[in-house]
Image: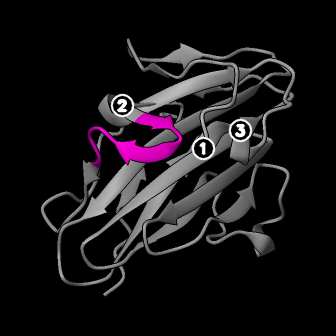
Amino acid sequence: AVKHSALNAVLAALAAVVTWSGAVEAAVPVRVDEDHGRAQLRPHLETAVDPGGSWTVSDVINGHAPGEFRAATGTVHHVGFSTAVHWARLALVNPSDQRDERWLELSRGIDHATLFTFSAATPLSSRELGKLMPFSKRDVAHTSILFKVLLEPNETRHLLLRLQSEDTFFIDP
């Protein structure tokens, strides 16, 4: 059965309590199961700002990015006009013995959003979306940016977001 419950990250995907330096270990992964239709991500997210947009996903995963990830605080964070790249990370755990499909929802104001995912059993994969991408190329033809996240049974999946926009956007979990 397909679950269309969004992991509501209306750009809350810019903040986690995940420690990534060398080995990727989630301090407090978000538990997703039938009892959690929508999950509040802010307590589980960290963000970092890459002012020049020069970090690679390898830099971030291996702890070589010079920026420092920080836990989200407060309610809404207005990023404003910026050429900086914003990174966010978190981990999701599927404690069940069945495959689970979830949706990560970002605000519609982001020009470019790349979701990188991986787990102990799966290699790094990526998916690009954003407000500039035609609906025909999106997972769901919707004005919000929706990433489908598949979780295998008893899997902890790590998510890393790279976000950039030439317009203003905000973080509101």
Label 1 SS: helix
Residue where numbered disc 3 is placed: 59
Q: Is residue 104 above or below residue 47?
A: below
N-terminal-most mark, 2 or 1: 2
Q: Which one is nearer the viewer's eye here, 114 or 67?
A: 67
Query: Picture coordinates of residue 56 (x, y %)?
Result: 78, 42
| 161 is within the stretch colored magenta | no
Residue where numbered disc 2 is placed: 17
Residue at screen point 40% across, 57% down: 6
- Residue 160's disc is none
Helix, strand or loop for the magenta stretch, by majority: strand
Q: Quadrant of the rendered structure where residue 110 is?
A: top right
Magenta-highlighted residues: 19-29
Q: Are marks 1 and 3 in contact (CB under 8 Å)?
A: yes
Query: Picture coordinates of residue 154 (x, y %)?
Result: 24, 73
Residue where numbered disc 1 is placed: 61
